[in-house]
Amino acid sequence: MNIPVEWSVAGPAVIVAIGALVALLVDAFYPRRTWLGSGLPSSVALLWGGIELIRLRDDIVPSTFALSLIVLAGTLIVVVASNVMNFENAMPPGEYHFLVLAAASGALMMVAARDLVTLIVALELLSLPSIALVGLRQGDSRAIRSAWTFFLASVVSTAITLMGVSLLYGVAGTLDYDGLAAGLRDTEMPDGVVAVAVVLTIVGLLFKLGAVPFHVWIPDTYLGAPVMVAGFLSSVSKAASLGAVLTLLSAALPHTYDTWQPLMAIIAAATMTVGNLGALRQTNAVGMLAWSSVAQAGFLIAPAAALLTTDGLSAPVQYLAVYALANLVAFAALAVVLRLRGSLDYSELKGLARTDPPTGVPLVMAALTLAGFPPAVIGLVTKYVVIRPVIEGDHVWLAVVMAVNVMLGLAYYLRFVAVLVDRPAIDDPYRSPSPPVSIRISKAAVLIGTAGLVALSAWPDLLLSNLP
Amino acid sequence: MRRSWLYVVLTAALAVAVAVWAVPHLDGDPTTKVWIEGNDLLAVSLATHVDSLSAQVLLLAVGVGLLVQIYSTAYLGHHPRYRSYALVIVLFLLGMIAVVVADDLFVLLIGWEVMGLCSYLLIGHEWQTPIARSGAAKAFLMTRIADLGLLVGILAIGQTYGTYRISEVLAQEPKNSTAIGLLLLVAVVGKSAQFPLHTWLPDAMPGPTPITALIHAATMVAAGVYLVARLLPILEPSELVMTLLAVISAITMLLGALFALVQTDLKRALAWSTVSQLAFMFAALSVGDSDAGTDHLLSHGAFKALLFLGCGCVMHAVGSSALSAMGGLRLRMPVTFWTMTIGFAALAGVIPTVGFFTKDSVLHALEHGRDEGPLPGGIAVAVFCVALVTSFLTAAYATRLWLLAFLAPAAEGRTEPHEAPRAMTGPLIVLAVATFALSIGQPFHLGIGLLSTAVAVAGIGAVLARWRRGRSLDLAAPWLVAELALDRPYSRWIPAGLRSSARAVVDVDRDGIDAYSYGSASTAQVASRVLGLVQSGNVQRYATVIAAGVIVVTAAAVIWT
Amino acid sequence: MIAAALTIPFVVGLALLFLRTLVSGRTAAWLGAVAMAASLVLFALVWEGKDAISGEVDVEWIDLLGARLHLGATAISWPFLLMTAFIGVLCCVWLIADDTAPALVGLVLIISASSLGVFASLDFLLFFVFFELALIPMWFVIAWWGSSSVEPSAEGDRGGGLKNVPGPDPRLAARSAATRFLLFTVTGSALLLVGIVLVARDNDSLQLTEIRGGPLAAAVLIVLGFAVKTPLVPLHTWLPDAHSKAPTVGSVLLAAVFLKLGTYGLIIASSVLPEGFADVAPYVAGAGVVGIVWSALACYAQDDLKRLIAYSSIGHMGFVALAISTMSPIGIAAAVFGSVAHGVITGLLFFLSGSLKDRFGTASMRAIGRGLYARTPWLAVAFVFAAVASLGLPGLAGFWGELLSLRAAYEVGEVLDKPFAWTAVGFAVLGVALTTAYFVRAIRLLAQGEPVAQDADRDLTVRETVVAVALVASIVVLGLAPGLIVGLYDFSAVTYSGTYTPVAP
């Protein structure tokens, strides 16, 4: 088996991987629990990776570029916002940054993968550090249980994917995407076998994406994980899985379109509906965002039902970019709130936009973006963007399901917003006169992210014309 | 008190202006004038059409209106709400003028409904009493619902003739007469209180008496007659419409007279008399003789206004409109007595009052209706016979009312009544003079005249004879006293049906139609709870869900291909 | 100029929201009134004639989707724009009081400006953005200021009330009504979004000036979306709750402006999707006339005055829907006139019922008691005037909309076939009769009757008088000179795509 290595593509991933090692080393020799410790080299590595990526832009497939950029930027936000986390007692900063960067490196490989072996390797490189991150907090039994759940789901999903991959190899005789495409076109295998092979391969990836019915691990994992890890899983990890699915479907499996297309459509519809329904009764911000990320996955998959049209690839990527940014802003803001207040129940968040605008207002903006509602125009525009290919593919029923889910989603996002802008309890004991530097840095990250959302809302073209 | 003359002056100015406009047209040619041309789409132009008929009706309206305003200064001048009362009368007159002179049907409709509104407001003038409230509401609802016939009828006319201008419509060959006619008939029957929509008029009597004289005797209720007379050329070709009109008028005139005969309340009796007399006019119209109908309109306007105003004087004196409270007023209220005697004579059709002549014309027209005109011969004969019977009854009840009000022994234990102030008796005298003056130049038909005089004398004689013998003039006819329960659908059944269906609608709206929203909301909540249950933290259960999912998805894919 | 007319209220509104602690309620309301008045004047001045698109602005926005910042006033939208700005001014004038929350003024401005944006948009996506923009502010107006005039108390939110049946707690009831309103509308507008995507695909353009038709599915979805907003039976159930629970200005804006977003949208749909709309027009007409009768019956059983007016709005919108479904110039004229007339008349009714609610703390007619003619004469007279205008008395604004829509249904038989149209006319006429019945009932219960004085009997205050007089004047003017609006249309009426065929009178 001869796997060619495109260094131009692998470059950023390698840089990030090196960054991970450096972070570990720095922590070993210069253990600091503030941003000056392992966080700094991590950030530098991510920035450098980004620069490298942009330098190589012309050599890379547009969608891969966009997804890689989302992964890098998302990870950067995670790293910066992680400053606020409670490194003092429970979290070892060196390991934390190492794991985050390693996972990011896996995510970068995953979106760039053009053959199934790379894909599996990258998947593992993303999954294993992620599991460790979920359970990283010491002495927290809930975190351990979440990690265990996550681990189980990952193992199962990898196993299923491997099964599908081996079947595909049996059918097509190669693991290279281009070869697979040709092989599946010319294969004389029975349709059933091909179908099973294709479906099993996709299903493994859908696990990571959190599509119904493979979403069951998500709420538990997010609730048990440190907040920024949940943010990482919901954005970076999801971006990688989505990228892998899209590339796989469009590059390797186009000729089995008839097999996976209706399946993807139904899964998309079920995912968004189940996710939204699950979120309806949540009274914890992370729980709500966990279920909402399931629902958003449905919106991400939906355009895949019309993948063979022009907008099929760019639409989900654009949607993902906005979703990831909004989600990370929300999680980062919540991380700050958690640090200050110790809980993320709605009762704790009441009136946040009035008492602490730098976290409350970004949360409002993020929720409205996720809901797709003005004044977060960009959320609405990206909803339009994902509905468009669905319509182009003549799946009006799916578009209507999406429309109904926009309403369902608004029901709980609005409730969240209403909590945030409600009149606060009279005495607010959490106001500290001079917050520590780490909190300021995290807040800065939150505000920069919010500024991005506002800028995109004012000028959606900024996003739409620059990502593919 | 001084302030109240302001409104008289206002009304007088209006009356003078209208008179200056109308008088030259009394004998002149019809003139149509467009003041403002309408937009294509809206097709409403402010256009007027004045001919001798409309000039006469105009003069009647503003004349009675002015008299009523003068009368009201004494009758209601001290009322705390006199101002709004007087202003609404002016608004009413404007509405009436619009109806009479409008050439554009929409302008006519505006006037028509403004009159209805003013009628509503004025009947409900004493809105603190339940009887006035319900009477006002009933009058407004019944007339307005009937008015919708006019609205749709106008649309039908526009559709048929391509114009909403009466003069242009009349210039064309009649078309589509039956449909248009039936629609207009609905409106007319409602406005002029004809069977079966006749019950609102007697119930409108809680309104101030001058208002009754103006709106519910002389002008508004007669507007239906005026409208039919105006549009008669396009209705006449339809035998159905004219037959229906004849039958309705026959029923109404008979019922009205019978009910008038048994009333114990002077004002209500006069109201039924109005219903009956309006039916006379329609009867004339139904045989195609619009002149006879409108002549009777004018004469009735004069003498019925006289009677109602006189009734107001009596009520002013004795404080009630019940006949039992009256009696013995002849000497106490001489002016009222004599003028009302003239009014009753006109009502009974005694020569030489104008009532005699115009009734004579109507009967003459009906008699001719057998041979010519739009009605089938048999129907015309039947209506003629009913009209004769009604004439007999009319003479009878007029005499009865006259006797009971003025000549019967005075009711016991009441303070001595006085003659009404001059502002009230003045208009009576004017109208009494008019009751004679209008006779001048009226056509006269000898045979019919003799017949009708004989019938009237019989009616008067029958009552007088009974009176002489000292018998009670109250007929023991419980069915008639109950007015044949014809009001029951309007007073009970329809409101009850409306209330129960309204309640049903509200219930269905909340529990039936809204079920889909509450249903889907609670379904969502239940689904959300179920999803929460799955999310138990039990890894084994997750594995089960996942395994099942994989199997289902794979199986689906295989079956699909 | 249009951009300025939209920006001024937006900016002032946002400023009031963020600086709400710095200004008094009275100042805020004055500021708001001035801003809306400026907007009104600008919109009035922008007019360039009925054959042109006035004050057109066309700037690149989202290139990739073909969406542009495309604004302008057409013969169809101009009356809506003026009416909305006018109502906005009056709402602010209404709020000139000491107990006004500055934030409420800010929200009112944002809602008005967003609605103006809807009417001024010539780009379908921009239209949609404005359409959605007004919703969340309205949610806050209803949920926070609804049912009682106090701001939410600290213990008000128990996280519940999202979709619960209205409970005894007025705050929760208002919140639940607000949420129902929002979810209904958003369901509709999400379907609308799908429809817009469909239309955009078929025409390769989002400009209302360029769209020429679309598939039936698009027409169905778009009409559904607007039908929720209008609302047409059976999608109306959100309306009585929302209107009756909202604060006075909220009710006024909901009735006078928000419902018009629906009817205006239907007009647009009939204009840009002629074929598809023609297929659904019978259903629109049917829902409209059923709504007329249905809502009139529902009104007859109401005790709460605001609820009664809310239901009556459904009936009036039924007339407008009937008019639009004829797809004729006269129908469009009827729809525009009916919408504007309903805006001013129902605005007046809601202002006056707000006055009553301010005084008596409830809008229940039984609780307010009889004999207002004697207790608060001018208030009673204004109310009776508004009621009479609303029941369609000829010579007042309410009449012409109804008349023209009946005429359109009666005469124009191209989209609806004759038997159907005439049945519709029959239903509509029955509805008019019932409308008279319930308004007469309301007048009997409130204005007439033996007066029993209450402590709260106060006649109109200055600000209330100003608002009432302005609306009464506009009702009379529109009633006596309907040509002011109808004159904007002729047999070759200006439409976005010019698809109407001339119809003989």
Image: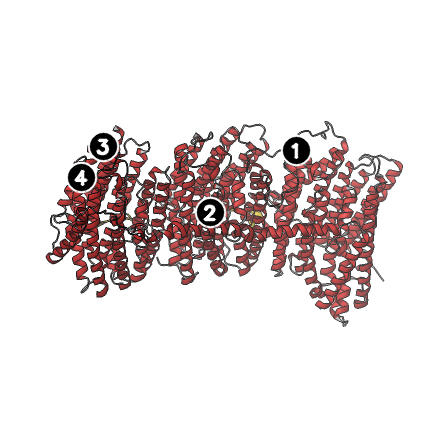
Residue B337 is marked as: 4
Q: Work out how far the residue at label 1 is from the one at label 2, CA to CA, in angstroms.
A: 40 Å
Which residue position holds label 1? A424
Whole-angstrom CA distance, mark 4 to mark 1, is: 83 Å
Residue B44 visible? The answer is no
Q: Amino acid at mark 3?
A: Glu
Left or right of B59 on screen, residue C421: right
Amino acid type at mark 1: Pro
Is A64 in front, or is A371?
Answer: A371
In whole angstroms, how far apart are the C-alphas of marks 4 and 2? 50 Å
On the same chain: label 3 and label 4? yes
Q: Which residue is mark 3?
A: B416
Between marks 4 and 2 in the image, the one whose residue lies nearer the viewer: 4
Residue A296 placement (x, y as % from top left): 68, 50
Tags 4 and 1 both on a single chain: no
Are discs 3 and 2 less than 8 Å apart at CB?
Answer: no
Instruction: Report helix, strand or loop for mark 2.
Output: helix
A180 in relation to C459, above or below = below
**Disc 2 marks which residue?**
C299
Q: Chain of mark 1?
A: A
